């Protein structure tokens, strides 16, 4: 019996083949996926995930786990001889424990659904990113997807208390812990988070919830140098408790997007624009404190100008420039995602911009980022860019990142698109240990083969 | 050549044997260690750690890594045929990067030394625990040691950005990352943190620093039920940004220690006493806001009484009761360390107290904990307690913990003392995966054998 025959016999309608495989299983948001898989399994329970994996493992059949397909590194894209396991039917919030401030959720649940459920229960789920409407919790955790609220409550892996994952051989590994402190052996949950589906298929998680802020204060500041941006960040972290966003836009990005949106905020063209947001608690004097802080920063010369949003609408205008949807009309737009020690970001952006503009004089190159999280994004577009051009861009940027001891992937992961550059951020010894862990948990190498670590042989272990 | 001969030939004076092995290498603070090791290696560099491990690995020689020996689970205690690697000579802060807010430190550096260095540079190192004067950073990380400041900045593993560890075969695995976001493959640092020296020897770390608070406001509150404690915690987390401690004492603990210290705070005997602390930023109105919050809690009936410390000395008096040094004079004192979902802690403490007092009518049993971190401590003392008695206490407590889906070790780790109870908090599948990771990284099983996972054979993998 073939693997597909056995899957169909055991799981019936949960298995799609031939024409029943729609195009959405082809590629994530990188649009780099070229093939449909030979079958798609859509389990409705953890037991069905385990059954599917057990069968595939016995047949040495490669498996690609899929969530909401919003990734940008090709980590969920199948080859023609892969079988996809899509978590899309495993949705739902199983429990909100108000006393423990936790939520237990199935992996296929869209992020936005979990955010809303948390809010209805009076909590904030601090995991947030642009793709919230379609990305799924399982995929968020498998990629340790970052986002814009990291500054206050940490990265995604810091907000996961418990995890359930199914191993390649079908073993269900259930660590649905609800406690902040738990030192009973190795922290298995951290092994799976960020492993991009290569070590197990995440099926359930216990997420940590935080108090829901009463409101938010938002300001847009104009600054003249990166040194001022770094100094303002430090002062804001010292003095604004509840600081919940610090988004930095270089003039290359801010100017472009203001023009696209038809918005004008400052008299002059500031070298940097920073959105500062602070969560409020509904107590007296919070706005006055925020204004006093900005007043002090003006007086100290760290900022040249500042606008405090007087309404939700004004705050949204600041964020519209930051979201930069105007960039989408640029041809062959690429969003590079790197991280660097905070103090090094200013010089890096300058050197990187110079190098890219020298190599591609017609290119759009602009910079923005979550500086407090050491995370810089580079928007790059050049008309008629070929695959080779884009590979060359990667080469230029990642060589510079490597020289500054940065990371070639801050939040997007490695997948297939950054796989050939992994050694710019990881030593041979580190990569070898990753392969050994992979071989220990998935000895037949059926889970998402070729992703993150590439293909390798036993002698590489 | 024997392993010791080869170590001496290669590392010379760094190797202690015979009479040169002093008693301090025998046991950690559990006092459960019985034997001196057959040799102690005291490397002065990462290269020497690598050399020592390579030699031991070739000789299949078991190695026990030692830090400040302040652990409470026996994780650093040697057997007579082990060789100890002590990190005590590898001390020093290599760098403080103010822009990145990071500190790079050698593993043998005492925690208090790193805390002071951070403060001198204008930062807070959020890792803190009672043994700060003698414990070492490497040991703190190897055990993911918790502490009293977790509520604001997370557990120890959340405050480590980079790590260097030497594997059993002498490979130096250097991941000295300074970035908050870094998604380039598996998070190896999290594999070593909390593994209690069974996967590698931590030699260096990049720690995350936070803004140094301008000051602290401290209050001692009296409450009448655990439901009120949980409700107060939730309100404090919502409304006090900068909440930096929430320490709960049951009357059994609070009453005993007030009497021991000759202190009296309240007219009546409250069922619970809670220390609330808030970091301040040196801005106007902070004390008034803190007072208003407590006033509101009084008005809402959540607290029966509250004292706000008017001086550092008054705050210290609150903390003296919490530290509970008076307990030390009790015979055979045991401090059990468990965690439970926050909502379950109240009932657990009641049932646990009843069960222990029924089994040992002459016992002192008292409860205190970091409730916000789901962490409960149980102080137990009975005159003339034998090893069997203490084992019986463990059995009673951990059975209850298991029923409440809690953890048998919140912050102390497993070591040897909790090893036989690991299955109360971890499933057979989880333990099997831990063993597979252990075998992948330390195939000869030389690193801290028998700790955490016990001894096992190949067929258990």
Image (cartoon, coloured by chain):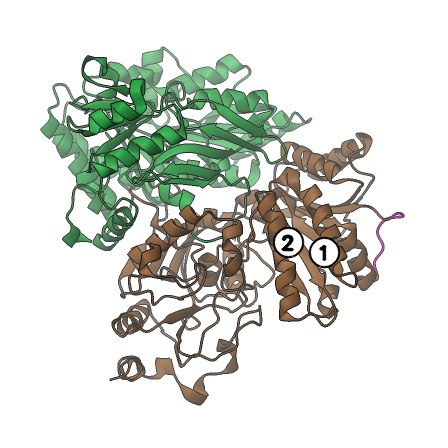
Chain colours: A green, B brown
Q: Which of these two is toward me, A271 or A192?
A: A192
Instruction: Give the residue at x 79% y 51%.
Output: B251
Q: To which residue does mark 1 refer?
A: B356
Mark 1 Cα shell of 10 Å, populated few (<14), some (14-19), many (≥20): some
In the rendered image, residue A25, in percent from the top left (x then y), is placed at 25, 20
The CA span between labels 2 and 1 is 8 Å
Can residue A36 be seen in the rendering of this structure? yes
Residue A354 included in the magenta stretch of the image: no
Please give left or right for residue A428 compared with residue A230 in the image. Answer: left
Instruction: Give the residue at x 16% y 51%.
Output: A458
Instruction: Please report, as a chain letter, where disc 1 is located.
Output: B
Q: Which span of residues is magenta-colored?
A: B263-268
Residue B264 included in the magenta stretch of the image: yes
Verify CB contact (< 8 Å) between mark 2 and mark 1: yes
In which quarter of the view is residue A166 placed?
top left
Query: In terms of secondary structure, where does tag 1 sit?
Result: helix
- Image position of B288 with respect to A108: above or below: below
Is the same chain shared between marks 2 and 1? Answer: yes
Whichever of labels 2 and 1 marks the residue nearer the N terminus, that label is: 1
Can residue B100 be seen in the rendering of this structure? no
């Amino acid at each position: 019996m073939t693997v597909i025959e056995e899957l169909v016999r055991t799981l019936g309608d949960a298995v799609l083949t031939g024409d029943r495989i729609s195009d959405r299983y082809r590629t994530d948001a990188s649009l780099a996926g070229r093939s449909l898989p030979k079958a798609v399994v859509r389990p409705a329970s953890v037991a069905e995930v385990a059954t599917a994996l057990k069968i595939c493992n016995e047949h040495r059949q490669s498996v690609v786990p899929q969530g909401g397909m919003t990734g940008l590194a090709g980590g969920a894209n199948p080859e023609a001889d892969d079988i996809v396991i899509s978590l899309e039917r495993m949705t739902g919030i199983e429990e909100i424990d108000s006393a423990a401030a936790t939520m237990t959720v199935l992996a296929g649940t869209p992020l936005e659904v979990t955010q809303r459920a948390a809010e209805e229960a009076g909590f904030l789920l601090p995991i947030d990113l642009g793709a919230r409407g379609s990305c799924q919790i399982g995929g968020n955790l498998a990629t340790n997807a970052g986002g814009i609220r990291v500054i206050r409550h940490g990265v995604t892996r810091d907000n996961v208390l418990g995890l359930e994952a199914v191993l390649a051989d079908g073993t269900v590994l259930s660590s649905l812990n609800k406690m902040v402190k738990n030192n009973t052996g190795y922290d298995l949950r951290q092994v799976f988070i960020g492993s991009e589906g290569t070590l197990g298929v995440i099926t359930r998680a216990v997420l940590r919830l935080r108090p829901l802020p009463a409101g938010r204060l938002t300001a847009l500041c104009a600054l003249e140098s990166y040194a001022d941006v770094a100094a303002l960040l430090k002062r804001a972290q010292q003095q604004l408790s509840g600081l919940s966003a610090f988004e930095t836009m270089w003039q290359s990005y801010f100017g472009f997007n203001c023009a696209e949106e038809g918005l004008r905020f400052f008299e002059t063209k500031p070298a940097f624009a920073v959105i500062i947001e602070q969560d409020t608690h509904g107590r007296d004097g919070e706005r006055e404190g925020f204004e006093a802080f900005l007043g002090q920063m003006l007086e100290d010369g760290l900022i040249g100008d500042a606008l405090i949003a007087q309404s939700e609408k004004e705050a949204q205008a600041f964020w519209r420039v930051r979201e930069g949807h105007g960039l989408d009309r640029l041809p062959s737009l690429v969003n590079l995602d790197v991280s660097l020690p905070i103090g090094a970001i200013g010089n890096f952006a300058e050197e990187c911009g110079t190098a890219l503009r020298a190599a591609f004089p017609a290119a759009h190159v602009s910079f923005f980022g979550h500086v407090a999280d050491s995370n810089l994004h580079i928007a790059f577009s050049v008309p008629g860019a070929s695959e080779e051009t884009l590979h060359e861009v990667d080469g230029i940027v990642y060589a510079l990142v490597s020289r500054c001891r940065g990371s070639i992937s801050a939040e997007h992961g490695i997948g297939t698109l950054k796989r050939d550059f992994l050694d710019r951020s990881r030593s041979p010894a580190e990569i070898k240990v990753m392969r050994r862990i992979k071989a220990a948990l998935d000895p037949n190498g059926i889970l998402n083969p070729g992703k993150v670590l590439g293909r390798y042989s036993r002698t590489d272990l």
